Image (tube, helix red, strand yellow):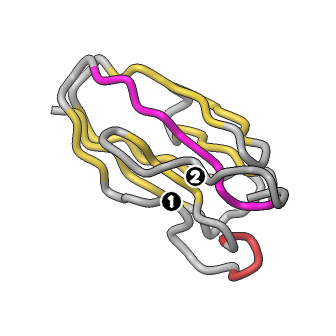
């Protein structure tokens, strides 16, 4: 987390997190869990528990979510398929969501 009073974003169903220390470790994938499998119509939450800004950007351009430290944001995935995504700031960070 970014400060002593900030609580980490909790893991849970349909939540993809950037763990604390991801940028410092410079070690992929940088998102957890990956892959994540969800039914069509699911709202997926991306959260950043790291002390550095990241993005969750779909390789096909379907979403581009900036994530400052401690922030979370959502996207709803309605079309079945396999979606790969990455951090535009840290190339080693990649992930996959499978929508069924």
Q: Which mark is residue 69?
A: none
Residue 14 is one of the magenta-drawn residues: no
How many tags in the picture? 2
Earlier sequence position, callout 2 versus callout 1: 1
Q: Which mark is residue 31?
A: 1
- The secondary structure type at the circle numbered 2 is strand
Q: To which quarter of the image does residue 89 belong?
A: bottom right
- The secondary structure type at the circle numbered 1 is loop
Instruction: From the top left corner, tell me how far across and down residue 78 is, in percent.
Output: 29, 17
Vertical arrangement, residue 66 with respect to residue 55, above or below: above
Say which of marks 2 and 1 sits in front: 1
Vertical arrangement, residue 33 with respect to residue 67, above or below: below
Q: Which residue is mark 2?
A: 86
Q: Residues within 10 Å of mark 1 (few under 14, many from 20)?
A: many
- In this view, the residue in front, 1 or 29, is 1
Residue drawn at 48 percent across, 34 percent down: 45
Q: Start and end of the magenta stretch?
A: 42-51
């Amino acid at each position: 987390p970014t400060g002593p009073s900030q609580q980490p974003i909790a893991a849970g169903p349909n939540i993809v997190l950037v763990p604390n220390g991801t940028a410092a470790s410079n070690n992929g994938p940088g998102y957890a869990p990956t892959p994540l499998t969800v039914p069509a119509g699911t709202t997926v939450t991306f959260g950043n528990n790291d002390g550095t800004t990241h993005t969750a950007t779909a390789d096909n351009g379907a979403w581009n979510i900036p994530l400052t430290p401690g922030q979370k944001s959502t996207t709803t995935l309605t079309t079945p398929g396999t979606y790969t995504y990455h951090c535009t700031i840290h190339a080693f960070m990649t992930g996959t969501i499978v929508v069924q």
